[in-house]
Amino acid sequence: MAAAQPQPVSHQNARIDVVVVGAGFAGLYLLHKLRGLGLHVKVFEQGGDVGGTWYWNRYPGARCDVESMQYSFSFDDKLQQEWNWSERYAPQPEILRYAGHVADRYDLRGDIQFNTTVKSAVFDERANRWTVTTSDGQATIAQHVVLATGCLSNARTPEFRGMKDFKGKVYHTGNWPHEPVDFTGLRVGVIGTGSSAIQSIPLIAEQASQLTVFQRTANFSVPARNAPLTDDERKSFRDNYPEIRRQAREDFKNGIVQPIPDRGALDDPEHERREKYHARWTSGGLTFMGVYNNLVLDQRANDTAADFIRERISEIVSDPETARLLQPTDHPVGSKRICVDTDYYATFNRSNVTLVDIKAHPIEQILPHAVRTGGKDYEVDALVLATGFDAMTGSVAKIDIRGRGGQTLNDKWAEGPRTYLGLMSAGFPNLFIVTGPGSPSVLSNMIVSIEQHVDWITDCLSYMRDRGAEVIEATHPAEDKWVAHVNEVAAGTLYPQANSWYMGANIPGKPQIFMPYIGGVGVYRQICNDVAAKDYEGFAMTVRARPKTKEAVAL
């Protein structure tokens, strides 16, 4: 068979300075900032609209686990003053409306090509340009490519025996239908008990005639205590936004402003420690892990928090055996991202809800109308796969990315992702990653990390233009040093003890390496700033004399 001929490149495509992959919050802010530099930008988005993970994750109960007044852009004060969040934790439809508002407010849609998947990106070492091929058969030539593909956007669908024979509807929480799904009167099976399941199970249980939850690994969850925001609460944030944003960027590891602990868990007597845990449990939210400053560092300290949550589960869940199964015992609390819920544990007190332990009795087969596990068939009319994502690297791995010498990024990352600062990977010039492995990323308020990365990348491109630099790439020594640092910092915590998606443990065959940088957003920001201040130390820039033609690009 003859090789397919490449698509001709149009004159417009030849003038593209930057191709951005993804139109979630990172892609939108990138487009806005790059336009401000006067660059020609093209954004490719596989979805039908903006929003990224919030475009795909439409399952019942989907909402952010960071408070809405903090999970929002800070780059435009008018935007943060004018947008009215309705709840403490914004639901998915509202976050999607916010993304759409940002796109419209800054007139971004005109440079975004929707329903388009990036298939490959190949670097031409002679021309110092990337050729980006998309699902519509077109090829776009650009000087730079920025991967704003998101950390949780590649849904994982396990291959259960017999799945193709199932006669009912199958849904994945990470790729939910756009039209409403009504489970009224149906027997529903939910496979998985991670964050998506913990949010959706209480609402599905209200509709389904019978809900069977198939759990392999119990997860720690704390109550959200979600509620409508009052005008006074919104005003308090707005009046203090400059300081709140500064603290989020500089003072807090996870980019979420909260009370700062001044001691470890074992520094308080037991009754005071329990009072503090109760106070955080009552107030709700991710700040539970911020009660003390050593919960992810010291196992004995961590045990006090984990035991407290397990006690609460026993109090809430009436059936002792169900409560036992819901109590995590195989990982320290917080070593997997702690979940935030509304009535999750109480849902198992409903007469129409059953919990099945598939760790002890793995799923053997999906039958046309049932799930078989432990030799028993559980009849279901619909299946919900809450089976998570190929996190952090999965969306990048779907693209055939080839750098110097034709090396693919997948081959380079075969034993685990390698980056410098989570921003670039050696051997792949002019290719940037937003919130990639090796950066705080999913351990942080993603908006804080997105803004920092986008600002750093756009400042770097401006620096290159001012100096006539055509190519930037991470050096191998700098990358090796950074990977070693990321691993060293992670090893000093309890995080690697969990078989989490932070480690890639949820994907069969994926190398298990702790992917995010746990040093914190403030420390990381300072490191990135120092690198830039030292003329981008650890990066190599080259200037190439090129004849000036009408086709010359802006950078």
Image (tube, rainbow, N blue to C red):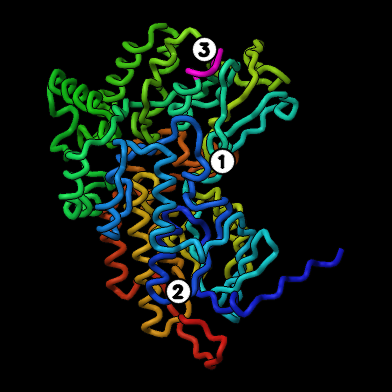
Residue carrying label 2? 472
| Residue 349 belongs to magenta span | no
Q: Which mark is residue 155?
A: 1
Quadrant position of residue 218: top left
Counting from the top left corner in percent of width and height, residue 486 is at 37, 51
Q: What residue type is labelled 3?
A: Thr
Q: Where is residue 257 in the image (x, y as percent from the top left)?
A: 22, 44
Q: Earlier in the sequence, mark 3 or mark 2?
A: 3
Helix, strand or loop status at disc 2: strand
Residues in magenta? Answer: 205-211
**Quarter occupied by residue 550:** bottom right
Q: Residue at x 54, y 17 (%)?
A: 208
Establish if 49 lies above or below 5.
Answer: above
Q: Name the residue under label 3.
A: 354
Q: Relative to residue 194, is residue 36 drawn left or right? A: left
Q: In this view, does 133 lie to the left or right of 205?
A: right
Of circles 2 and 1, which is in front? 1
Tell me if mark 3 has few (under 14), some (14-19) or many (20+) residues whose alpha carbon lies within 10 angstroms of its own: some
> CA separation, marks 1 and 3?
25 Å
Q: Which of marks 1 and 3 is nearer the N terminus?
A: 1
